[in-house]
Each structure stands twice: as C-alpha cells, then as structure tokens.
Image: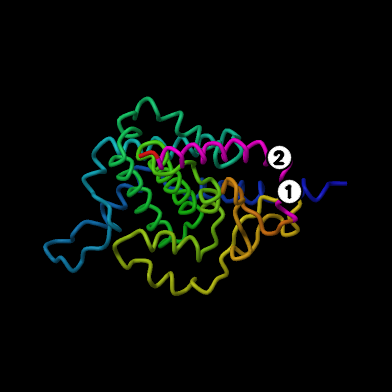
C-alpha cells in the first residue's frame, strides 16, 4: 500500500512534470518569439497610434549578447527537463551550468542579467495574452531565479536563494501568475486579464511529506520555517513531519543566514 507521504510527493512531482511538459509543447522557438515581439513593438507606417506594446523591453537588447544568453538558457532549461532531470532547482542548475562559461560576461554583470530578465518578462506577458500560461510560468520561475542570483551573488543583499518563491512561480494559479507580471511591467496590457482572475484564490505549496492536501493549499494558510525561511508549510503537523529531512538543510541555511547578518552589521 502506498503511504500518504509517497502519494503526496508523487502528486507534487506529477503536477510539476505535467506543467513543464505542457510548457515545452506550447513554447515557440526563441527566434519565433523574437520576431513576434519585434512585430508587436513596430510602428505600422507613420501612425504612432498603431504601435502595440513591447511591455517595457529594450528592443536594442535583442541584438546583443543578452538575447543570445536568453536563448541559450531557455533552451538548456527545456533540454534538461526533456532529458529527465527532476526538480525545478535541478533544471535551473543545469541551465546555469550550460551557459556559465560562454556567457560569463552576463552572469557577472547585474545590468546584463536584468536585461535578460526583461526579455523573459516581455515574452511571459505575450504568452499570457495568447493563453500559453505554462510557458509564462516557466519564464516567471526563471525571472525569480535571476533576481535572487543578482541579490545573493552580485549585489550581496540577500543571504540565500528563495527557492520556495521560485517553485511557487512554476505552480502559480492564474491570479498569482498574472499579478506577478502585471506588477513588473510599465504598461497596462494585463489590466483586463487581471480583472478576470483577481477573485481566484491564491494557492501555495506545503513541503510537508504527509500534507493532507497533497501539498497544494491556500497561500493564506502557509508559513515559512522561521529559522531558515527556505521551506513552507500549512500546519505545525506538516512542519514536524518534514523535520527529519529538513533539519540538515535548515542547519546549513541558518548558519549561512547568521553569517550574512553578522557581516551586514559590521559594514
């Protein structure tokens, strides 16, 4: 008989795998996306009123190394998933490893990383507008990953990568997904869509192996591990049931956070 712990774990993995598989099937090629974006931001004739929106993207960035990095990272992520790599952090790590040498100039420059983020952001908005929500979820997860990378490794304003938030982006219901993009773009292109989804209940993940809701719960009921803030639960019972596997990670992360805070106080 399958235990509740294994059943919950399998349910979470199945949901993530299905979403990523659908995203891979829906995602157009990077070059096709670029042509769509260029067309959407171009002006027909001399009438400026016919110009549609690029969602804040700098079109000149599509011609430099940042766009090539966007393409390479995106392709490497989907290749990792297609090759059977399990887990969001693992796929992101594989994509980072595949691009870290060739695009070292981007990985070391926060401004260039932010340009790459803006490309993912604009593409994600386009995907929402055409109903390709799973592709938009992948882009949202990558945007969060890049933002945390900048904060942790380049600007050193944050102690740890916030993987619960990254993971949340991949499983986001439409309210959370649309709001994520809407608050990050300078245009009003998602206002109509947001009005349609804003009453949906926001959902979150519970990392408890015996979670009675199979790890999918209302976000208002969730809370972080107060010690490391790198794991999320919906109840004290779920937190206790996860402690045996979480303890090692929690101990390590708590030390990292303590060292980071001590260093910050000395500055």
| Image-based side of 173 in relation to 40, left or right | right
User: How far across and down, in percent of the image, does residue 197 sit?
Assistant: 49, 71
Q: Which numbered disc, 1 or 2, marks the residue closer to the eye? A: 2
Q: Please report the bounds of the magenta region as a residue range.
A: 237-265
> Circle 1: is it few (<14), some (14-19), or many (20+) Cα within 10 Å?
many
Q: Which of 1 and 153 is in front in this view?
A: 153
3 within the magenta span: no
- Asked if 95 appears above or below 183 in the picture, the reply is above
Q: Which of 220 and 263 is in front in this view?
A: 263
Residue at the extreme right of the image, as rendered: 1
Q: Residue at x 33, y 32 (%)?
A: 108
Q: Which residue occupies the foreground of this view, 225 or 113?
A: 225
According to the picture, the residue beneath numbered tag 2 turns out to be 245
Residue 253: give x, y in percent of width and height.
57, 39
Residue 209: numbered disc: 1
Q: What element carries label 1?
A: loop
Query: Which of marks 2 and 1 precedes in the sequence?
Result: 1
- Dominant secondary-structure state across the stretch colored magenta: helix
Task: For the residues labelled 1 and 2, say whether their Cβ atoms are less than 8 Å apart.
Answer: yes
């Amino acid at each position: 008989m399958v235990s509740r712990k294994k059943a919950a774990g399998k349910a979470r993995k199945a949901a993530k795998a299905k979403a990523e598989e659908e995203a891979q099937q829906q995602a157009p090629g990077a070059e096709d996306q670029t042509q769509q974006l260029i067309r959407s931001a171009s002006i027909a004739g001399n009438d400026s009123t016919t110009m549609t929106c690029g969602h804040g993207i700098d079109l000149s960035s599509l011609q430099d190394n940042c766009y090539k990095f966007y393409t390479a990272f995106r392709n490497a992520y989907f290749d990792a998933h297609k090759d059977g790599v399990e887990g969001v952090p693992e796929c992101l790590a594989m994509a980072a490893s595949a691009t870290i040498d060739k695009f070292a100039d981007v990985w070391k420059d926060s401004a260039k990383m932010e340009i790459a983020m803006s490309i993912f952001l604009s593409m994600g908005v386009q995907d929402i507008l055409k109903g390709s929500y799973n592709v938009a979820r992948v882009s949202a997860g990558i945007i969060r990953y890049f933002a945390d990378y900048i904060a942790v490794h380049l600007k050193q304003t944050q102690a740890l990568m916030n993987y619960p938030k990254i993971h949340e982006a991949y499983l986001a219901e439409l309210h959370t997904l649309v709001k994520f993009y809407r608050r990050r773009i300078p245009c009003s292109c998602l206002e109509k869509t947001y009005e349609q989804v804003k009453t949906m209940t926001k959902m979150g993940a519970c990392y408890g192996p015996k979670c009675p809701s199979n790890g999918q719960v209302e976000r208002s009921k969730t809370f972080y591990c107060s010690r490391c803030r790198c794991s999320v639960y919906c109840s004290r019972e779920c937190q206790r049931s996860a402690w045996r596997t979480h303890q090692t990670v929690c101990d390590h992360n708590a030390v990292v956070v303590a060292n980071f805070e001590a260093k910050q106080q000395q500055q």
